[in-house]
Image: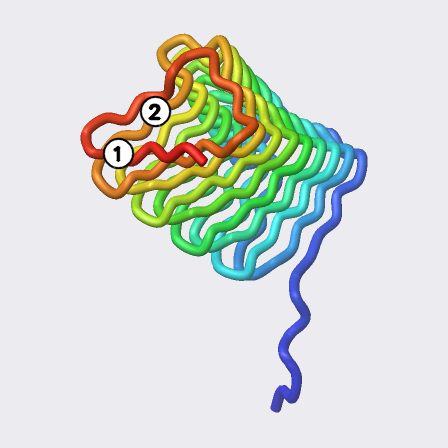
Amino acid sequence: QLTSPLPRSSLTLLRCDISTNAGHGAFVAGGGFLAVSDSVLYNNLGCGLEAEGTGSVLLAVGTRLIRNDAQGVRAALGAGLVMTRCCAMGNSRDGVAVEGAGSRAHLTRCESRENRESGLCVTGGGAVELSYSRLAANQHDGLAVGGTDSLAVAHSCVFNGNVAKGAVVCMGGSAELSECAVHCNGSKSAQVSDEESRLVLSRGCSLDRQPVAASGGALVHL
């Protein structure tokens, strides 16, 4: 009879190059813990890194996710993600994706650029806090938040040079930006659309064009 819980599965990768796999570069699920430091994950047919499921945690520090066929990094179905000083570049989908209720991410001093979709995409009730980070030159939006209870909170970040919008909120999502710069994006600087969607722009934000509220979306200036 077990008197204590089974030990948590864990894996640490330090200074690794992981490439050309038929699936993800590295994957954690089932409540496991994956730590990746000072590594490069590139040219994988899935994501560079993925965490899936409640209790699963992915910690990435000083790591680059380059030219993967799916997202650079994906946290889904209740997983947790912490990224510090990481770069997601040239991936075929989003640079970073946080999907599903209970999925949570914290990004600090990260960059997501030149991805074929958005720099950071938050959907399905996921939540992200990002600070001192840059979402730039992505082929869709810099920051995209969509779906009821989806949330992004950004502080001292830069959203620039994206083909579509610097930041977009839709389908009931919410985003709060403080001391952020939103410049030189192709379509609009920032847009909120659809009922129950909310975009808050706090003092200290710098936008080169007026933000847009459409189709019942709420735009709040503080």
Dot label at residue 191: 2
Q: Residue at x 56, y 27 (%)?
A: 204
Of the 4 image quadrants, the one containing the N terminus is: bottom right
Residue ID at (50%, 13%): 183
Q: How is the image coloured?
A: rainbow
In this rendering, would 171 be left or right of 33? left
Q: Residue furthest right?
A: 15
Q: Is residue 102 above or below residue 119?
A: below
Do the CB atoms of the residues marked 2 and 1 lie less than 8 Å apart?
yes
- Residue 184 location, x and y as percent? 49, 8
User: Looking at the picture, which amino acid does disc 1 mark?
Assistant: Gly
Q: Which residue is mark 1?
A: 217
Answer whether residue 83 is visible to the viewer in this image: yes
Q: Quadrant of the C terminus?
A: top left
Expressed as whole percent of the image width and height from the top left, the position of residue 159 reads 52, 20
Q: Disc 2 or 1, which lies upstream in sequence?
A: 2
Identify the secondary structure beneath mark 1.
Answer: loop
